[in-house]
Image (spheres, grey):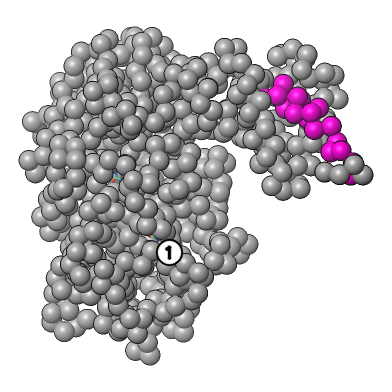
Amino acid sequence: MRHYELDDADVAVIVGSGPGGASLALRLARAGLDVVMLESGRWIDPEDFVDDERIAFAQLSWLEARRATGGWTLAQDFPALPAWNGHAVGGTALLWTGLTPRFKDHEFRTRSSYGEIAGASLADWPIDPAELAPYYEESERAMGVSHRQGRPPMPANTSYRVFANGAERVGYRHYATGPYATNVEPYDGRPGTIQDGFNSQGDRHRSKWTPLVSEIPKAIATERFELRPESHAVRITLDAAGRADGVEYLDRDGVLRRQRAALVAVAGNAIETPRLLLLSATVGHEHGLGNASDHLGRHYMRHTTGVVYGQFPEEVHMYRGENMAGIVADESRHDPERGFAGGYYLETISQGLPSFTTFMEPGGWGADFTARVEGYPRTAASWICGEDLPQPGNRVTLSDELVDRWGLPAPEVHYDDHPNDVAMREHAYGRVEAMFRAVGAERVWRAPAMPSGHNLGTARMSADPANGVVDPEGRVHGVPNLFVSDGSVFTTGAAANPTLTIMALSLRQGDRIVDTRRRGEL
Amino acid sequence: MTEDQPAPAAPDATASTLLALARALYPHPGIPDGPYVRAVALLAADAAASSELSALVTAGAAEAAADLGDPGSATLEARTAWLAAHEGEAFFAFVRERICFHLYDDREVWQLLGYPGPSYALGGYLHRGFDELPWLPDPRVEELDEPLVEIGPLGASAAASAGVEVTA
Ligand SMILES: Cc1cc2nc3c(=O)[nH]c(=O)nc-3n(C[C@H](O)[C@H](O)[C@H](O)COP(=O)(O)OP(=O)(O)OC[C@H]3O[C@@H](n4cnc5c(N)ncnc54)[C@H](O)[C@@H]3O)c2cc1C
């Protein structure tokens, strides 16, 4: 792998090796820029992934101090784990399952489509959806998404058979096993899935798309890219002219180093990205970089979510096969007649016994709990993924009390449901119950959110610097060579799972950076 | 440990009380004591990490033993009632969470409850029934070749059936 000197001031420094950072890195390296990637987590070879929920959780997850506050159930159920993020090369994609719906056009214009909603900070995205379309297509190819760009559909596993039959019987029409970013058959040098049911444990087989098995090795092969794992960025530095000129980070031995930079892109996910920008407060940016208008860390979104479980007279064996290869799109529309704005997807979810007993009723115990545990082989489940409304008070802040292992203020994540979120979730719970009952469920029950896998909105995109943190290219307002390249930039969250859109935005941003640099402006 | 050091205060009593409580927290008549004993031992090891936690567990177990007489012979109802009365206390919260965590991570429990665990070495389920569900028809896996309604109510045919009461 190429090596760059710390005082090489001509490199692009990217913080974070998840889908956002890795897609940008490959784009820039292939265009001939020199890229240094700082990743806080370790390099873990896919062979070292473990098909065991508990061991893999400890191996792959971000387990630094965090705190959940506010009215959301997570503050009660998992107060130290508001979000489930990855902490290794490849980022949270090591944990992700891989559903990749696109945004709908009107979801880029929610303020115009939904109108004014009290308490919500709805805004239209400052970009034209048509401009993103080719990047969506390219992202689908990069991930080898099933059902798209000539890739075959995923076959139906047991969970999907229950879910799709239920959907059909309640009158839904738009159900399918994808789009799903795991190989059905060999593609891009990686094998087809063996349906082993351990997506969120990294995927030893490498059928699941992650940057670890795709963008990162490809970027290394350009010889224009250096990956530095176990390098935790702690501060972005600015020069006298107010341009980003380096990133300070702690290396694996805890030694503080500084990589000089021509430009910096932050892709640490929507909790760590605003934390780093807040920690980088300096003269002229007293409240953090990009925070002149007090939007940094605010408008945090995580999707309106919850899980419904159904138990049937006959066996399901939900642990067999791809963990989330099933989606119903009929309710993803915006239809105010249902009593709320925006829409939601219903998705299959399968869990091994340790996860099932952790999430199916957090805090539950007693004979009624164990009766449901004994029904595990006869259980199917569906996860709700709906658009939650941005609210300024839902935010990531630096803790006054908690510190992480590096001695830095830990993030606190505050979230209160908007009434629209509650109404949507109630509706969704009811629809899944109807689906499961329609195929003979003897028992159905609702479970609250799991720690958030989707984290969005904390550095929102706006054309006017007064209304957000980054411009339509993801460039931080007020710091011309500092970019945000992850879901933090989402102006609103849409119903869709976010990662395809994160990648599409990164590729678009990469093209803009390359153009700007060719013009000599970066 | 040398002769002059005092023996730890009745560790066996604490463990047997915790065993009785664990069996009431997560009662599975078909699961023998072995996995519960292992879960209690792992809980004790977790508690040993901090003197506060050890003290919490010892004191909570002593209180349960005092209230229940011999917890090992107290009825399931009596133990359940004791737990319900102490729900919300730190002792309960710690013991419940740790027992749930360790009990359902036990290989013998997996086997008894029908969770096979890792499948990679066996080739996953590709040729071992990932798609086997004989009690329902084969569903379509492709997306429907028909546009999705993005704004407004569902199309007429879908709305007609989506609204109806469905009986199991
Ligand atoms: C169980 C689960 C299932 C999911 N399923 C889906 C799905 O089906 N579809 C979908 O679209 N999305 C899904 N997601 C979400 C998806 O994983 C994320 O949207 C995606 O990984 C975000 O990419 P990112 O690059 O923005 O951030 P991440 O993937 O989180 O990467 C950020 C990286 O930055 C690193 N980092 C953070 N701070 C620093 C720092 N200060 N210095 C150096 N490095 C740092 C982190 O270690 C991490 O590696 C799922 C998530 C989970 C947890």
Q: Look at label 1 and name its amino acid.
A: Glu
For residue A444, say whether it is visible.
Answer: no
Which residue position holds label 1?
A230
Q: Is A378 placed left or right of A111 in the picture? A: right
Q: What x and y, as percent, mark residue A84?
A: 44, 47
Q: Which residue is at 19% across, 27% downward? A: A155
Q: What x and y, as percent, mark residue A491?
A: 30, 57
- In the foreground, B143 or A61: A61
Q: Which residue is at 76% across, 48% downward? A: B51
- Quadrant for the N terminus of chain A in the image: bottom left
- Extent of the magenta region: B5-22
Q: Is B102 placed left or right of B63 in the picture? A: left
Q: Which residue is at 71% across, 43% downward? A: B48
The disc numbered 1 marks a residue on which chain?
A
Main SS, magenta residues: helix
For residue A50, say whether it is visible.
Answer: yes
Q: Secondary structure at mark 1?
A: loop
Most extreme residue toward the bottom is: A240
Work out whether A343 lies above or below A516: above
Q: What x and y, as percent, mark residue A420?
A: 39, 41
- Whether the magenta-drawn stretch holds residue A441 is answered as no
| Callout 1: CB less than 8 Å from ligand 1 | no
Residue A47 placement: quadrant: top left
Q: How many marks?
A: 1
